[in-house]
Amino acid sequence: MFPRFLEQIAATGGCAHPVHLSGSTTTRDVATGEVLHHYDTRTEPGERLFVRCRNRRASVCAPCSRLYAGDTFHLVRAGLTGGKSVPVQVRERPRLFVTLTAPSFGPVHRATTDGQRCRPRRNAGTCEHNRPVSCGAVHDVTESVVGQPLCPGCYDYPAHVLWHAHAGQLWDRFTRATRRTLASAVGLAQARFRDHARLSFAKVAEYQKRAAVHVHAVVRLDGPDGPHTPPPAWATPELLTSAVHTAARSVLVRSPYSPSIGELELRWGTQLDARPLRAFGDTDGLADDAVAAYVAKYVTKGATDTAAGTDYRLLTRDDIDAAAVSPHIRALMRTCWHLGGLPEYAPLRLRAWAHTLGYRGHILTKSRAYSTSYTALRTQRAEHQRSTETRVPDGPEVATDSQWRYVGSGHTPGATLIAAGIADDLVLNRELAREDLRAPGGEVE
């Protein structure tokens, strides 16, 4: 039984928190009723099967996060260079790497370079809370003070939290405004834009040092049927860049009115970057692979990596006090908890999202036509694994009956050490394989 136990852990890639399933699956020939394949967990150690937890956070499960990062890389890269059912012609489409930031909610300490000081102001004095409104220190990026408010009392914590809660609406209105701006620029009726072109995107959310989310996005212009049709002649990177800047400045979302806070006008920050992307052989713009690798690396970061929130939900206010976070993060969590108790903000579910500081969106989202999906990538991987493990025919004449139930998760202390060792071995094997490919004469099979 022990060798099979090791095989199960190895099959999950050394997953740190595998899900335990109990059940069976049977494949039959529909015409004859013959059983072509049968599997039952009663023959397994502990009568259970281990499957990956598929958590994206490296701080929770490093092996599964590496798999998630690989899927993300292929998902983003396919929308840039083709592949995975996306034609290679997308390389020639107008494409931008866009960064949208949050506005200022109050001055914070910032990292400086070349001896520059943080926030020097001559004879600045103090704020109403008797705190200095300037900082003449030189901060390294690793210092804990970076991103912390100069004065927590002056910092607009309610606006910060409510901006996070409406970031999804801001992005939705930004994409709509970009389409409207493009249509107006070329003399099209806004309702007819979809008949001429289609705007596709993949975006990732990232927490800055001040714990405010900003958005990195790949934006692409296609023909009306998506990546399989070329865009019209007027679709150029320059026109798309201009439309993105105009749309970002015009977007406005109003928060629900509150007697204590009022109605806030929420916008994108003034810092906006939109740079063209280049494929292999080009010299201008960002490289496709570099952008895909950056996005894939970020999606695996957890709260412990970004110092923004926690990797688990906060169930009570006491959980906020017990969390190992900075005073700035704790103040944002408490603001979520307080505002979440007000009836006018009940639809925002701020208490349920206090661990992400009010931000309710997924880390990575994409439009339907941008490229393939996580589901498609996982299905292809599962089909490949089944084809190598069992030679069961697949087709309309074959039927599969499966019955599974959840019976637990995680590892015992001893199994945890075994899984960690297997995961380390797999990482080492990948590094050795990369070195072989980089060596003279190395080729990818």
Image (cartoon, helix red, strand yellow):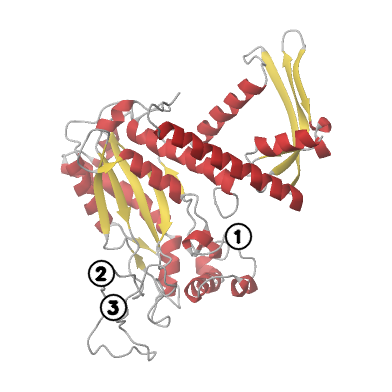
Q: Residues within 10 Å of mark 3 (few under 14, many from 20)?
A: some
Q: Is residue 232 left or right of residue 352?
A: left
**Hey, which residue is sitting farthest top in the picture?**
32
Residue 220, quarter of the rendered image: top left
Is label 3 in contact with label 2 (beta carbons under 8 Å)? no
User: How would you rate the neighbour count of disc 2 (Cα within 10 Å): few for under 14, some for 14-19, many for 20 or more?
Assistant: few
Q: Nearer the viewer, mark 2 or mark 1?
A: 2
Q: Give SS at disc 3.
A: loop
Residue that label 3 marks: 119
State the image quarter where residue 192 is shown. Answer: top left
Identify the residue shown where x is 46% and y is 41%: 72
Q: Is residue 308 left or right of residue 320?
A: left
Q: Residue at x 30, y 49 (%)?
A: 98
The kind of residue on which mark 3 rests is Arg
Front residue of 423/432: it is 432
- SS at circle 2: loop
Among the two numbered marks 2 and 1 on one chain, the one whose residue lies closer to the N terminus = 2
